[in-house]
């Protein structure tokens, strides 16, 4: 069974309104998903570049600040006076016994006045070295160990820093101070004769950089983070694993090998993506790590919102389709109800839908058709009723006519059976005197009744009446009036002729009766056709 037009309209409305939205939304989701993934990866890379730039900026600041601080310290040392060594006050420094070093009146060896001023005022770790036996021995420092004791009596005997200092040059760069990385500047100290007698170092702990805390606070998506490690895969900055060595991981070795780029890898049961850059001045590998699930969480959230939007759109479309179809089919339903009433015979029903211009013509046409039907059916019913009444009257009149003809036939048969007396002597015929009077009365009664029950315009009836009149005239003759034999034959012929005409009239009435019966059947059939609206099991209107 085919669905109704309303259901098909409803279905097509949903298809037209929802499917394009789904296709457009799906296509948009794919594009947005790709764009979000690309933007997220770009964001990770940009974070990596931003950290690189921050570190480089920090280095530039240190490159300007440390020399400036060193020059200020040199000026202070020069302001103290000339360097001198008091051999009367020998002190033990490591494996060496050294004279006490003074700059002006300021004691240097195992005195911490100068360096403590630097740490207090400018937060600068500082150490003063004294040159002995081509070794730089630490004689004063504000750098402390974890237990709070000062790091002293250590030396510098080799390495790039030593090479610079022993040649009277400045070293600016990173350096490990008892295992703690610093940004440092090492400057040689000369006496009045420009003889190298020692050196000092000013520095800043890398762990105290403001940038370190800034890097630690950086998060990528929900669970991403930034990791800093050196060339030995020692973790410098990590949310949980600072200080560990992670050289054993393949992806770490790939990072150390490539130095710059990106890599995807599985770690701790999750897929990750890392963008990395190598900052050579600090020997730092800046690794920005994003979790793939986090990167895809935004598209998944967008997909959920999109699905919810589609669901809401479908529900709204369903409501709109329902109300539009309801509004559209209201006049049609009214028309159907009007047709059902018309089908059941109510031709007075009218269909009014002037609210909608589109149905105005249909409304006027239906009402005009209903009005025309009511007139035609009214006329047909009236004609049918008249036809039935006429057929009933015709049948009744024919029944009466048949009865009259039967009586007439009996009367004629009686007349034909009346005796006639013949005279032997004179060959004269005499009518039987005892019958003419009765016969005349019967003829008069017949003549009176015949026109009453039969249409007087019928020629055969008129002819019969004429014959009856002639018979009556002859029977009014005096009793025993002699008639000749020829007259007797004429009377018999007339009686025979009347009888024959009566038989013919009977046949005619039988034919009229048959026709009247057919007319009654036609009237009955017309009456059935008049009630055409009351037929049941109509296959066209439910």
Image: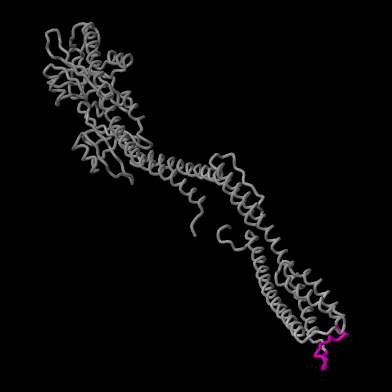
**In the image, residue 429 lies in the stretch drawn in magenta:** yes
Q: Position of residue 65 (x, y in %)?
A: 25, 15
Q: Quadrant of residue 148?
A: top left
Q: Give the mark count.
A: 0
**In the image, residue 471 lies in the stretch drawn in magenta:** no
**Residue positioned 27% across, 41% down in the render:** 264
Extent of the magenta region? 421-435
Placement of the C terminus among the 4 image quadrants = bottom right
Q: Position of residue 60 (x, y in %)?
A: 24, 19
Q: Quadrant of residue 177?
A: top left
User: Does residue 222 sit above or below 367 in this rendering?
Assistant: above
User: Closer to the camera, 373 or 86?
Assistant: 373
User: Closer to the camera, 308 or 298?
Assistant: 308
Q: Position of residue 444 (x, y in %)?
A: 83, 74
User: Closer to the camera, 518 or 414?
Assistant: 414
**Residue positioned 30% across, 26% down in the render:** 207
Q: Quadrant of residue 248?
A: top left
> For the stretch drawn in magenta, what is the main secondary structure?
loop
User: Does residue 424 sit above or below 98 in this rendering?
Assistant: below
Q: Position of residue 42 (x, y in %)?
A: 29, 33
């Amino acid at each position: 069974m085919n669905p109704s037009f309303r259901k098909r309209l409803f279905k097509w409305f949903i298809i037209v309104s929802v499917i394009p939205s789904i296709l457009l939304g799906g296509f948009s989701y794919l594009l947005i998903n790709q764009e979000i993934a690309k933007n997220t990866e770009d964001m990770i890379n940009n974070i990596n570049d931003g950290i690189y730039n921050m570190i480089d900026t920090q280095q530039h600041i240190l490159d300007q600040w440390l020399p400036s601080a060193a020059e200020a310290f040199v000026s202070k040392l020069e302001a103290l006076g000339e360097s001198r060594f008091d051999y009367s006050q020998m002190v033990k420094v490591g494996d060496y016994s050294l004279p006490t070093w003074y700059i002006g009146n300021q004691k240097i060896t195992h005195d911490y006045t100068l360096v403590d001023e630097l740490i207090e005022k400018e937060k600068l770790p500082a150490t003063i070295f004294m040159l002995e036996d081509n070794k730089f021995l630490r004689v004063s420092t504000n750098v402390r160990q974890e237990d709070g004791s000062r790091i002293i009596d250590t030396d510098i005997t080799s390495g790039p820093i030593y090479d610079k200092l022993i040649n009277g040059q400045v070293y600016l760069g990173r350096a490990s101070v008892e295992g703690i990385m610093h940004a440092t500047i090492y400057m040689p100290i000369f006496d009045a004769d420009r003889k190298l007698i020692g050196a000092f170092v000013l520095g800043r702990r890398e762990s105290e950089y403001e940038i370190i805390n800034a890097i630690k606070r950086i998060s990528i998506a929900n669970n991403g983070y930034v990791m800093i490690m050196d060339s030995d895969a020692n973790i410098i900055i990590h949310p949980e694993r600072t200080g560990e060595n992670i050289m054993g991981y393949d992806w770490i070795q790939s990072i150390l090998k490539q130095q710059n780029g990106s890599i995807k890898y599985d770690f701790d049961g999750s897929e990750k993506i890392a963008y990395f850059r190598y900052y050579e001045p600090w020997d730092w590998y800046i690794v920005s790590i994003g979790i793939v699930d986090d990167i895809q969480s935004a598209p998944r959230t967008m997909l959920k919102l999109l699905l919810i939007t589609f669901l809401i759109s479908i529900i709204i479309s369903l409501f709109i389709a329902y109300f539009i179809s309801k509004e559209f089919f209201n006049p049609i339903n009214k028309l159907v109800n009007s047709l059902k009433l018309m089908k059941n015979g109510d031709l007075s029903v009218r269909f009014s839908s002037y609210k909608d211009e589109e149905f105005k013509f249909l409304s006027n046409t239906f009402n005009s058709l209903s009005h025309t039907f009511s007139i035609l059916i009214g006329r047909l019913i009236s004609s049918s009723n008249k036809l039935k009444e006429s057929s009933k009257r015709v049948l009744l009149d024919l029944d009466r006519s048949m009865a009259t003809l039967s009586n007439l036939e009996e009367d004629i048969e009686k007349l034909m059976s009346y005796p006639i007396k013949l005279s032997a002597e004179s060959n004269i015929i005499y009518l039987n005197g005892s019958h003419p009077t009765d016969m005349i009365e019967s003829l008069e009664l017949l003549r009176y009744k015949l026109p009453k029950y039969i249409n007087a315009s019928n020629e055969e009836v008129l002819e019969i009446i004429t014959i009856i009149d002639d018979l009556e005239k002859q029977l009014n003759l005096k009793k025993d009036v002699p008639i000749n034999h020829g007259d007797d034959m004429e009377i018999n012929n007339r009686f025979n002729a009347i009888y024959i005409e009566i038989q013919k009239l009977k046949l005619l009435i039988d034919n009229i009766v048959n026709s009247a019966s057919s007319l009654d059947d036609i009237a009955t059939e017309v009456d059935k056709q008049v009630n055409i609206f009351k037929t049941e099991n109509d296959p066209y209107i439910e």
